[in-house]
Image (cartoon, rainbow, N blue to C red):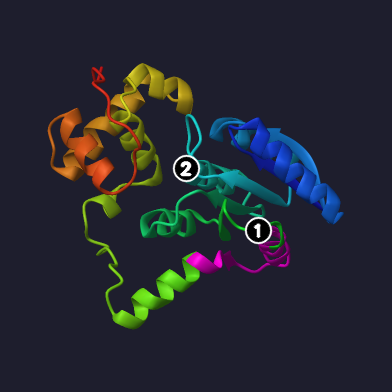
Amino acid sequence: MHDILLVDDHKIMRDGIRAILKVSGEFNVVAEADSGLDAVTMTRSFKPQLVLMDIHLPGLNGIEATVEILRYNPETRVVILSMYEDENSVVQAIRSGARAFVLKKASDLDLLDALRTVARGGSYLSPQVSDKFLNRVQRGDLNERKSTSALDSLTPREKQVMRMVAEGKTSKEIAILLDLGLQTVRGYRKTLMKKLEVSNVAGVTQIALAHGLARTTSSGSGR
């Protein structure tokens, strides 16, 4: 029996997954969370072997939460769930340390297969995702970003701040969400703007949206 933490901001989704896991008889849901920050906290408290987590979450998203989870619990294995199969989301998830990327439209059997594979120490990509990547590699047009790009020069924390800035959150709100000092957040903002070579929130937002790091725009004050 493998202990697992379920993370999704929709209760109906958690209920459905819990029912699937219960029928399998192989996984024990030790806790549930509806935000990335709660996922980090609960992983530190319950130390589950597996974390099954939605990619889009309030506060810290699933990718950012994965980075934080593995910072404190490197032995935990994270499985990312997503409605979307875009290349950027998959690459970010794997780079963050996630061991699997499963589409929400996958079957019950595919989800259980992914969890079993990761529990055994392996990795898993939904067939639709792996087929798409294979086709792009075979065509020779897989767009790998250069390590010298401005975006890749950002630390995971700077990317967290970048996304929140792009989504309109103020420095005070970001400080609360990330449990950081206000001046620390302002320092991160200043550093990431310098690295991105932009001078305002609009520039940060444009880059974040172009790379799929933010879902919405807002007229945040930037204070």
First to last magenta residue range: 110-128
**From the viewer's perspective, is 216 left or right of 206?**
right
Specify the quadrant that holds the N terminus: bottom right
- The residue closer to the viewer here, 49 or 116, is 116
Circle 1 residue: 107
Query: Mark 2 or mark 1, which is nearer to you?
Result: 1
Q: Which mark is residue 64?
A: 2
Specify the quadrant that holds the C terminus: top left
Q: Report how many numbered discs are placed on residues in the image.
A: 2
- The residue closer to the viewer here, 132 or 213, is 132
Q: Could you say where residue 2 lies in the image, as x and y percent from the top left?
A: 80, 54
SS label for mark 1: loop
Q: Could you say where residue 120 lies in the image, as x and y percent from the top left?
A: 73, 67
**From the viewer's perspective, is 24 left or right of 95?**
right
Q: Residues within 10 Å of mark 2 (few under 14, many from 20)?
A: many
Specify whether residue 124 is painted magenta. Answer: yes
